[in-house]
Image (cartoon, grey):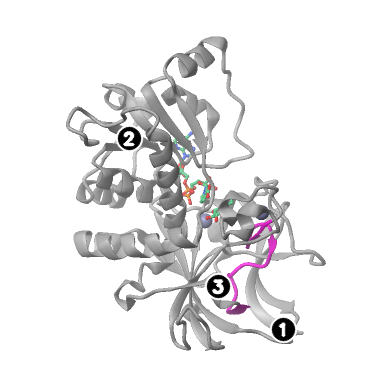
Amino acid sequence: MSKVKAITTDAPTGGAVYGDFELPDPEHYSAKLKTIYNGICGTDRGMVAGALPFAYNPEGYKRLVLGHEALAQVVEIEKNEFGIRSGDYVVPIVRRPGKCVNCRIGRMDNCTDGDKHEAGITGMHGFMREYFYDTPENLVKVQDNSILDVAVLAEPLKNVEKAFEVFNKISERSIFLNDFGTYEDKKAVIIGTGSEAFLYSFFARDYGFDTILTNRHPIPDQKTVMVDKSGVEFYDYTKDMDKILEGGIDLLIDTSGHPGTIFQFIRKLNHNGITILFGTNGKAPATDVDGADIDYLIENNITLMGSVDGAREHYFKALEHLRNWRHNYGDIMKDLITKKIPPSDVEIFSNKPGDEIKTIIDWSKA
Ligand code: DN4
Ligand code: BGC
Ligand code: ZN
Ligand code: ZN
């Protein structure tokens, strides 16, 4: 057994503790990795708050090492077909396969029976620890070291890559484009202003959508600057709902997990509109849905799609997007990372900074 500095929780009850955690030494390992950064996301906070009932500790453990968003450096690695060598920087994959057909083809994101595991979430220790062991097929190499400062965003972005892939398939059922075959004048509304919401907004804007971010309160100056520089708009829906709903909505993306809010917008989707449900909040209150709402969904061919996780190919696409955005938008990419903290700062899980887009744990500060 070895003691490793780690941030742990008791899933699904919650809490977060930083300190020495005992883990068995592997008899054999193919890669040893040093953690550089971990991202903190809504899922981590939901777990620490005890609001995600699907989270659970690894078998035989009373606690779970948190962390599914990471950038790590390879300390040692055996020869492998992925061209990963010692010294390389990698992003580890969150989901690990069960035995179902989708897991067997590397699409654990579409696991058929729920028997997969997720690092730092469901039954597998995560990456919020000073070092960890893994296998090369679960590591995605960062090919361009000029994006190392933002590469930790590849994990949250891979979810967006997958969600848009599903959107592409669904939108093919009718002509979703305008008369000129583009997305211009089509409207995408994104509920929430956290890191996933910003990544969705970059994506929707790249498609050509008129892209609006919205929340139930104003956003701090730092986020306003980000919104302005990236060519999207923000409205507080408690004050400016009319502006958001003008002309209806073609693509609605929710990152809040708040049914009462989501349904206020769903009722304004245009014909053939699509909603991507992405935010999870097991503690959000119920909302009324009546027969007229169901009629509205049916008569307008509205799709409600849930989307979770992403596959290895989406990590690659995410790293490529980060590279392109860095090229196109320069430093605003870096501004998505609003704070770097030492791993001992575990209050961050329960006290989200008001101006946070993405907070990063920096292991060099341990
Ligand atoms: P986050 O930063 O907590 O984002 C949630 C956003 O929703 C925040 O900006 C909240 O605002 C906002 N929000 C909460 N309630 C409302 C409401 N009633 N109306 C409008 N906005 C509201 O988390 P994240 O960006 O890291 O992740 C977003 C969500 O996606 C989380 O629920 C994650 O669990 C989930 N997630 C799913 C997947 C997947 O399906 C992957 C990653 C994350 P405020 O906090 O500023 O007030 O694969
Ligand atoms: C992760 C996904 C994971 C999901 C579980 C997200 O934060 O990015 O990989 O499957 O949480 O809800
Ligand atoms: Zn996450
Ligand atoms: Zn499976």
Tell me, for residue 26, which label it has, or none: 1
Label 3 or label 2, whichever lies nearer to me, is 3
Circle 3: residue type: Glu
> In the image shown, does 248 or 62 lie closer to the viewer?
248
Circle 2: residue type: Ala
Report, in whole angstroms, how far the alpha carbon at label 1 lies from the one at label 3: 18 Å
Q: Measured from the top left, where is residue 210 in percent x and y?
A: 24, 36
Residue farthest toward the left in the current orientation of the protein:
180
Magenta region, residue range: 116-134
In the rendered view, would you say 138 is above or below 329? below
Q: Measured from the top left, where is residue 103 in percent x and y?
A: 63, 57
Tell me, for residue 137, which label it has, or none: 3
Q: Measured from the top left, where is residue 324 in percent x and y?
A: 26, 62
CB within 8 Å, label 3 to label 2? no
Residue 194 appears in view: no
Circle 1: residue type: Pro
Closer to the chain start, of discs 3 and 2, is: 3
Closer to the chain start, of discs 2 and 1, is: 1
